[in-house]
Amino acid sequence: LEPPTGSVQPVTENIERFISSPTTVESFKSEFCRQLRYEQGVDLVDARTEDLYQALARTVRSAMVDGWIATQASHRAAKAKTVAYLSAEFLMGPQLENALLSTALTEVARTALAELELDLDELTAYETEPGLGNGGLGRLAACFIDSLAAKSIPAIGYGIRYEYGIFRQTFVDGRQVEQPDRWLVKGSPWELAQPENSVTVNFGGHTEQYTDETGAPRTRWVPAEQVLAVPYNYMVPGFETRNVNTLRLWSAKATDAFDLQIFNSGDYESAVRRQTVAENISKVLYPEDSTPQGKELRLKQQYFFVAASLRDYLDTVLRDDDLSTLPERVVFQLNDTHPVIGVPELMRILLDERGLGWDEAWDITRRTFNYTCHTLLPEALEVWSVDLLGRLLPRHLEIIYRINEDFLGLVRETYPGDELRVRRMSIIQERPERAVRMAFLATVGSTKVNGVAALHSQLLADKVLDDFSALWPEKFTNVTNGVTPRRFMRLSNPGLSGLLDEAIGTGWTNDLAQLAKLEPFADDASFRAEFRAVKQANKERFVRLLAQRDGIELPADALYDVMVKRLHEYKRQMLKLLHVVTLYDRVLKGEVKASDLQPRVVVFGAKAAPGYKMAKEIIHLINRVAAVVNNAPELEGRLRIAFPANYNVTLAERLIPAADLSEQISLAGKEASGTGNMKFALNGALTIGTDDGANVEIRQLVGDENFFLFGMDEPAVQALEDRGYNPTSYYEVDAGLRGAIDLISSGLFSDGDRTAFEFVISDLLYKDRFMVLADYRSYVDTQDRVEVAYRDEDAWTRSAILNVARTGFFTSDRSIQDYLDRIWHAPAKPIA
Ligand code: B1N
């Protein structure tokens, strides 16, 4: 018998004679029915929505497989340089519509289903999104892999297949209550498990020295624990390309060693319990956005997915190739510090497994990694205690020490006698406990370090990593974030998309700079009327959704003022709330007649980290204010607050197209970029915002007259901090502010209980770390200007159109092009 050669050439040549992808109405119908009957074992007449959705999703998935297989084969054959995007979060959002858009099968599916008396939109609405991310960082990763695919770049996303994604938020008596997100219980129709490609990941144990065959001293890691990492593949189709990339998410499973232990052990129960411990690694997404907790399980998650991903790439993609050319074959992009343990991991592989010398290994490693920083908040900078790291990953700690030793040698050489600087720059901090500063390790271990907006990158280089940018100025660069126009315009805003197609052609979807062609239409009265009609229709669509989803009844005829993002003090939801309370207070005091108020719907959407007390108190306060304001007869229904629970990508897609006003009101110097701000502008909302993050660039592009700027800029914030900030002084001099705060303290929103919101209010008055009170006057005055501006329909619509026309820069396609040009240098490989 001939041994298998690994080649299946004769079969692949013929395979299309036997099967074909469901790309016509007939074949789509047939595949759909086949899925339903033979894969799910359900008859069409008995099928529930769940069955129909699953069959539809699998049908669409099968339409992507040919492109996926061809893409992998072509990239492997070409030994194409691959972008490996390492991220602990991928917040993908619903998949069905996007897959249909990319395969250009939306109309085929609609017709095929209609012929079976089924409705595509109904099945689309049934989908529940995988919430494998917290907020902007995870959603950015999802936008980036979309753009990488659209540009036909060989790329792979590596992450974790959390069994529980971000919690489902509910409100009970106005307070946030978290429910587990069991997104996998019904199974995900979008994933393809590949257990045969599982890899082993080690933990714990110790290291030992030995001499190899050549007599050279070597080190090896003798781990104490093993976990299996099982890959699940998700296809990432590109828009208007046949290329389909891969998102590979790892799931933790106990190894066979466990099964054996269970079999042999007298203590069956504890053996099974240990199995659970192994599988806990990919159990749940940590729900903290921007404030890592330093939990052991989180470090395990990080090493788990990074070790599996490196192993996967080196063993299955590169196979036996010479690792000295690694930097020409792959670039590992670190999405924040969460995957930074990959730096010592690659060193360990090169040193201990491949026998390379330190210098060569370090050269390869440094040229293979790049680091994106997403924050400026000091509390968001990850550190791992030496104690914990040494226990979990003893060999990695040794390697980190050696990296640090060499690095500090360089610092001493460059700055003789400057021991203060050496201490500042050490990868190991000494106080409050000995710990590894992951941002420093990332910076030392990477070729390029980038921030995510112009201001952020500048502050990174000037403040957070100033010593490093002084040492290596050429290492630092900026790549301003972006968002995918496929999902956040074409799919989510069909009304606007149709209007754009008519006005400037359809090419904008993957070449968003073409939005500039819209500019002259801002002065076209009939276009403005159509644009306004689209916005109005989007509001009505959103109002219908909210009635259905949350039982919230809203007027569609109002200014839609929207603040959606994670609840965090630095983002300042309190500032927005103080504005709302101020409007109410003015009416109560008779300073303003309700009938003179511009009807306004203020929409909040925000999850708080479950352990973040202040954030949860603010949620409670918003809900209590909403309950009173929404029913206040004095307001005659002209001011409404809507706070739908569980804001997620699905809701964002319906809400953003309906917005008139986008709230981007973080304290200057705190929001690294923001990406919601971009989505709103691209959908024709005007921004009220501080000079922070990407707001700076949005304002530069749309022009001051089309943007409501308010508040202190970053240097002013710094100056006030240096002078000494005293929030109470603002309360004392500003009657409007006093009115709003006193109204909250009066018990009006808490059934007469004057202490109910003391936790929030006394913090504002006596601490106010994010200077809400300092920016209050400027904010409220600017909101008053918004109200006047909104009444001039024509001028407002003109500004809204100009926001769309001038923000094409914020496509994630441009971000990816910037990464390619400045950092990755990986050419596109479109398949035939
Ligand atoms: O990343 C986004 C930015 O647009 C936002 O401004 C920024 O706040 C966000 C630890 C984070 N920074 N850091 C995180 C998330 C989860 C976690 O466990 C940190 N998220 C951001 C995209 O660049």
Image: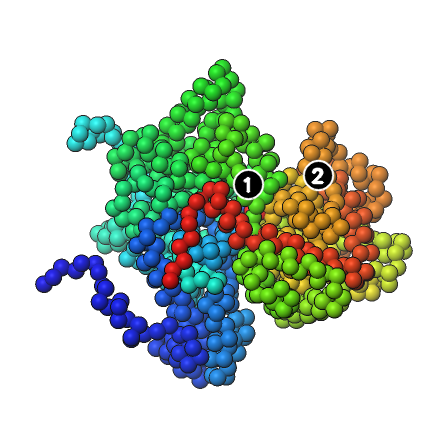
Q: Amino acid at mark 1?
A: Asn
Quick one: 695 or 502, which is closer to the camera?
A: 502
Query: In terms of image quadrants, where is residue 624?
Result: bottom right
For image coordinates 83% across by 46% down, the residue present is 736
Q: Point out the residue furthest to the left here.
A: 1
Q: Quadrant of the N terminus?
A: bottom left
Quick one: 737 or 89, which is closer to the camera?
A: 89
Q: Residues within 10 Å of mark 2 (few under 14, many from 20)?
A: some
Q: Amino acid at mark 2?
A: Asp
Image position of 633 (left or right of 542)? right
Mark 2, residue position: 713
Q: Residues within 10 Å of mark 1 (few under 14, many from 20)?
A: many
Residue 79: percent from left, percent from top = 32, 50
Q: Is residue 523 above or below residue 117?
A: above
For image coordinates 49% across by 19% down, the residue present is 415
Query: In terms of image quadrants, where is residue 554?
Result: bottom right
Residue 16: percent from left, percent from top = 31, 72
Q: Is residue 631 above or below residue 429?
A: below
Quick one: 799 or 118, which is closer to the camera?
A: 799
Quick one: 397 or 434, which is closer to the camera?
A: 397
Mark 1, residue position: 478
Query: In terms of image quadrants, where is residue 690?
Result: top right
Image position of 706 (left or right of 312)? right
For image coordinates 49% across by 29% down, the residue present is 472
Alpha-carbon span between mark 2 and mark 1: 20 Å
